[in-house]
Image: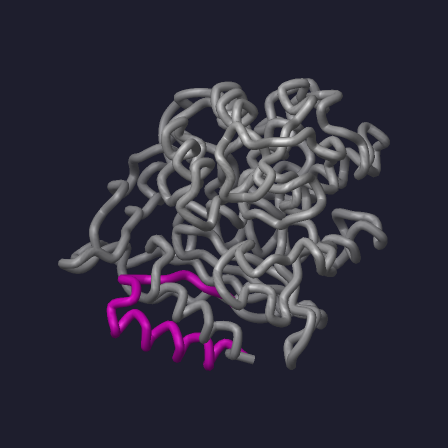
Amino acid sequence: MSAPLQDLLTRHVDAGTMPGVIASLGRDLDPIVLGTTGPGGAPLDADAIVRIQSMTKVITAVVALHLVEDGALGLDDPVERWMPELADRRVLRTPDAELTDTVPAPRPITLRHLLTNTSGYGMATSDSPVARAMQENRTAAGAEPPVLGAQDWLDALAALPLIVPPGEGWRYHHSFGLLGILLGRVAGRPTGELLHERLFAPLGMPDTGFRVREGQEHRLPPALRHGEDGLEVTEAAGSGFHVGSAPFDESHGELVSTLADLHRFFRALHDGELLSPEHLEALRTDQVPAAAKAEDSFFPGFWDGTGWGYGVSVLTAGPHAGRYGWSGGQGTDVFVDPDGTICLVLTQVEMGERIMGLLGELQEVR
């Protein structure tokens, strides 16, 4: 089963899409390791620790559903009970309106809204007053690590109006930063501790967390991006945001992990070890109302045969209907098929045209 994937990845390494890649395809972990850590770098290792960025979303979604199953909160509970910063929201009359042109939000933000990216906060997809405001107050989403601690980020975001009313529009990313903060507040302890207790320790995922463990820094390859003159280093090997002591509360942040840890998580998720059948089915099926799927939600064509569950996209039509998964902005990707096949591809090259092309081809390897 791995041969088509290996051929695809070899072609992209040879073409310079990425200097190296770690991958697996199948029910069981079957590592493929190609190339180097970077231009002129050492050979890549299967146990490299990588920045998974938005692949974090499904992990925090699972822990949120754990808390629901514990009775600690409900899917339709207003999150302002734990996050008073989000009470009494106002919403722009239109997504491109001036920041003062608002009306009261018709309903509070709930956990369900966070899990489905319909909180009303998210990436602005056009040059608008709110887009410029998010750039100015440093809450805009991007490939770089966060520059604000969790409380400062929350306060800055809460100072802005919602782009769309809760539940009425899908906007990417920020709902899951809010979810990370919510988890810690509901649990009454740091979000990283909760993730470790609920998932990483019981599943045996020693290299997954907000920080690279002390003494393991050598396993972190550089972060790269394509520039005009080839690949550029944005974070040097063994250093960067995820190394050393946390500069601030990073509950709204994203994780590092490994091929083996991620495979263990997705194997357990698919096999029903982590969630009730009801919540597992909800996680991997489309939960976004058709009316909330505006053309300007994300990139053009995103909703063609695609929906969004809890922390993952789901294919709703075509030969791979039922497949779910998601990507990370530093060139990582996962999908899980209904038969339990797991495909993981881990580069450390920032998402761009060439990486997007690879991930598009990846969908057709089986």
Q: Residue 175 at what x, y percent from top left?
A: 60, 39
Q: Indicate whether 156 appears above or below 127.
A: above
Q: Indicate whether 314 appears above or below 65.
A: below
Residue at 61 percent across and 43 percent down: it is: 204
189 within the magenta span: no
Indicate left or right for 364 with 305 as reference.
left
Image quarter hosting the C terminus: bottom right
Q: Give the range drawn in magenta.
A: 1-24
Indicate left or right for 229 with 19 as reference.
left
Residue at 38 percent across and 56 percent down: it is: 351
Image quarter hosting the N terminus: bottom right
Q: Residue 128 at what x, y percent from top left?
A: 43, 42
Q: Is residue 264 visible?
A: yes
Q: Quadrant of residue 331?
A: bottom left
Q: Which residue lies furthest to the left in this view?
A: 229
Q: Can residue 176 be seen in this view?
A: no
Q: Which of 199 and 68 is in front in this view?
A: 68
Report the coloring of the rendering.
Answer: one colour
Q: Nearer the viewer, residue 354 or 7?
A: 354
